[in-house]
Amino acid sequence: MAGVLEKRRELLSIMRDLTLEHGYFTVNDIAEALEIPRSTVQDWVSRLINEQCVVVKEEKKGRFPAKYQILSAKLAPACRRIFTTVDGDRVAIFHQCMSTGCAAFCAYHHTCAGGAIETIGLEGRLLVEYARIGDSDAEIGLYPLPAVGVLGVRRENGFIIQRISSVGGPAYSLTDMMAMAEGVCDVRVGSTEGIVEGEVMTRALTHLIIGVDDTDSKDGGATFALALGLIQYLGKMRRVYPIGHKVAMLVPNPEICTTGNSCSFIEVAVRPEDVDRVIERALRFVRNQSLSREWGIAVKKGFSIPGQLRGFGLLARRELVTREEALDVAGECSILLAGGNGIIGALAAVGLSGEKMSVLLNPAEMPDSTL
């Protein structure tokens, strides 16, 4: 089913582009663009006509092929990407939207509903939610009730299935848009007394946090820029979903840093079978692109931060820590380290993952957890 949905999205995308540009498309146009057999394209066109996604604009006339149009060519789905990572019995749900307004709407209503979602964050158009595997209840309906909520999350055979209840606009998203989002493998929906309930299936991906530090020199470069380049590089790999790039400040000390002593970390989601390949490419990128021999990289699997690792990251904001301390913490927390003294800042960056932005950027601000 996952492969069928991916092919359907690919075909509809190019059909939409050709319809907008030329007013129509032919079977030959699609076959040449995607380098697939005409018979395969014709089967898909017939299927999409039956689904009322495509209509015939002009019938075939002699040597002139039939022309087709996609319906609602100007309607792009609001849901761009939906993917999930797993760490033990916890699931991180990422929903990248085309609209900041729609993302904020879902964040607000999911918060009101509660349900299976424990914490919710909104970073621009990326909705980030954390849930525990299990079921919950919430009343969904028209105002003043929440219009949408995630009522359950379960794991089955390498997939994560969200159980969503919705009404109104969110119901339209569930029935007509979510299946078009990259990362979605299947959507099953039904309706009960005006409430649309559905299950959204995504792969159970591995969450990687990659910290880097000491990649620059007094002559140039910047660790934040290298980390940003790293997430762009990894994001071009097939089946890798970029999540985000953050900068964190450590204890300012002119003896050990070039400017403000900042480190960076990135987060990506990958299929379990691709983890080793992604880590190998990340190591090679940092090693080859660094301007300092003291570059360091730290790689953690999973998004949950153990207390000892969090403590190390917070300590590095207040005082100097040693390479030996970093090696001890990394060993106890199963974190891969590589490089020179940069492993200290790289590990601290990983340990600070999940802290709010003001804490990351200001070593003088205490996190809520320590107040």
Image: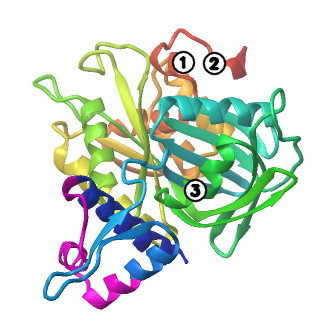
| Residue 290, above or below 284 | above
- The quadrant where residue 119 appears: top right
What residue did someone put label 3 on?
176
What residue did someone put label 2 on?
367
Q: Are there few (<14), some (14-19), or many (20+) residues within 10 Å of tag 2?
A: some
In-front residue for pair 286/25: 25
What residue did someone put label 1 on?
359
2 or 3: tag closer to the N-terminus: 3
| Residue 32, above or below 94 | below
Q: Which of marks 1 and 3 is in front?
A: 3
Q: Where is residue 163 in the image (x, y as percent from the top left)?
A: 75, 57
Mark 2: amino acid: Pro
Q: What span is colored magenta in the figure? A: 21-43
- The quadrant where residue 159 appears: bottom right
Q: In which quarter of the image is the C terminus?
A: top right
Question: Mark 2 falls on what kind of element?
Answer: loop
2 or 1: tag closer to the N-terminus: 1
Q: Does the magenta stretch include residue 31?
A: yes
Q: Position of residue 264 (x, y in %)?
A: 38, 33
Give the CA distance from mark 2 to mark 1.
Answer: 6 Å
Mark 1: amino acid: Val
